[in-house]
Amino acid sequence: MKLEQARVEFSKLQKRLSAFHHATSLIYYDGNTTAPPDTLSNRTKALAVLNEEIVRLSMGPETMELLMFLDENKFELTVNERRSVDFMLKDYNKRKNIPVEEYVRYEGLIAEAEDAWHRAQDENDFEIGRPYLEDIFETSRKFALMENPNDDPYQYWLDKNEEGLEVSTCDRIFESIKEEIPSLLQAIGESDVQIEKIDGEFPAEEQESLAVYMMELFGINMDRVGFATGPHPFTTMIGSHFDERIVTKYLRRDFTSSLYSVIYGIGRVLCDMGQADNLAYTVLDGTTSMVILQSQSYLYENIIGRSREFIEFIYPELDELFPDYTENHTAEDVYKSVNKVEPGLSRLDSDELTYTLHTLIRYELEKAMMRKDLAVKDLPDAWKELYKKYLGLDVPNDKDGVLQDMHWPFGAIGNFPTYMVGNAYGAAMVDRMGEAIDIKGCVSCGNFKPINEWANDKIWKYGGIYTSGELMRKFIHAESDSAGYIEYLKNKYKEIYKL
């Protein structure tokens, strides 16, 4: 095979994979937004066929022959081509001992588990989803041991979710959280400062108008971003960074739940859509790093979106949409309300501070289940125990407890710790960004162009060319250290609660 022919074939292969991923992403998006309730079987059959083709395209002998040839000639390839070959080879090495039929069965299991989990949520009954979750964790453990029989199975999935991320790094970050956050939380609980929770009547139509205003304010290209509602907020790329979707959920009594899920999605969409267009339809399209995506979502949702400057800027829009609320509440009231610290059962609706403990709980539980230190059947009780330990809360039922997240039934094991590493990176990015531009000044006047341009130059445009660790070291000059992140939280909440 000649090198030029191999490069052409490699480009075709990636475009085919992109097309199949386009189809599976669209099916997932449809299933979680507008699909009729009794269409699961139809989607499952389609996904089984598509996923089998994806596996065969990624793992087939012809593909391996092509990748090995290109790897042998890697110094004659472009940087993007070398990284794409390396990425696919690493993925192959993580799956080479898993039979195709096993992998296809697992993908079908995920589709069924999602539906069962929704039914379990509706009926407030963990037992409906338990058999599927047991199968998912058992299969995930089996896959890990097939590839690395002497290694920690949790490390396998952590690295699969985030290339290069080590359990030791996550342990170090979460140990810092356990050491620092509970005492800060206790001090806040003992503070004399009382902050009113946002509560009012906020029609869905006005919340939708606010969401569209946010997307336009931050510079989202609305011709390339779909917007919908669903039972669980999420953001996804459909096939390439030219097509993104944000899904939110409206709470009638609190407009900020949807507001911040949308801004969270905006951070991810900006990151995806800002990458170089020549990455489209390659395996580097839509950053391969969950940590980087989280860092951008955290930066926009919390560091910018919950800042005093941001609330003061958007207050006139809130006044126009929700006059009954703003009649009795100032911009400062809203700022304090969106930063109110109050331990609660919901991770998605938690404040910025207690969110760290929600994620810690999930990290400890999934790590224990992967290592067989915790049986799935005992998960609800273990969940309740940790919520009492870290947040001082009694969990009254499964729906408000163990059933609230879709990550595990979706097979996203090792995903939760990327949130905390991403948050730590987000804080480090803001420190570095502040050396180049006046962040508060930009936010105060609603000018996000300098912020977006800086982030695009340092982060977005590279897509999956670098791992998150490489990207941070090369362009941000920071490591995966939670010290700056925790210091940011301390400074912010000590000021609000006058500690």
Image (cartoon, rainbow, N blue to C red):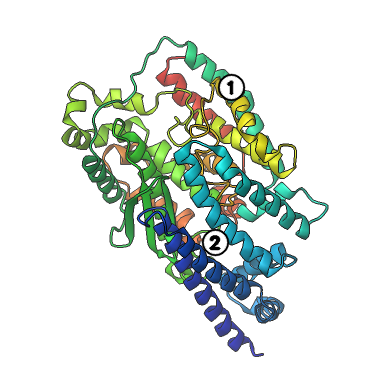
For residue 353, above or below residue 304:
above
In the rendered image, the residue lying farthest to the bottom is 2
The image quarter containing residue 384 is: top right
Q: Would residue 163 be visible to someone looking at this image?
A: no
Residue at 58% across / 79% down in the picture? 10
Residue 256: which numbered mark, if any?
none
> How many C-alpha atoms fall within 10 Å of the one at disc 2: few (<14), some, or many (≥20)?
many
The image quarter containing residue 333 is: top left
Residue at 54% across / 21% down in the picture? 394
In the rendered image, the residue lying farthest to the right is 150
94 and 27: which one is in front?
A: 27
For residue 392, above or below residue 30:
above
Rendered location of residue 401, percent (x, y): 53, 32
What residue type is disc 2 on?
Gly
What residue type is disc 1 on?
Lys
Residue tagged by mark 2?
Answer: 464
Q: Is residue 254 rendered to the left or right of residue 64?
A: left
Q: Is residue 61 rendered to the left or right of residue 185?
A: right
Q: Would residue 458 be visible to someone looking at this image?
A: yes
Rendered location of residue 433, percent (x, y): 45, 44
Residue at 51% across / 67% down in the picture? 45
**Mark positioned earlier in the residue sequence (1 or 2):** 1
SS assignment at label 1: helix
Residue tagged by mark 1?
Answer: 388
Rendered location of residue 356, percent (x, y): 54, 32
> How many C-alpha atoms fall within 10 Å of the one at disc 1: few (<14), some, or many (≥20)?
few
The residues bearing labels 1 and 2 have C-alpha atoms spaced at a distance of 39 Å
Rendered location of residue 102, percent (x, y): 68, 64
Q: Is residue 442 rendered to the left or right of residue 344?
A: left
Quarter that holds the N terminus:
bottom right
Q: Is residue 161 rendered to the left or right of residue 371?
A: left
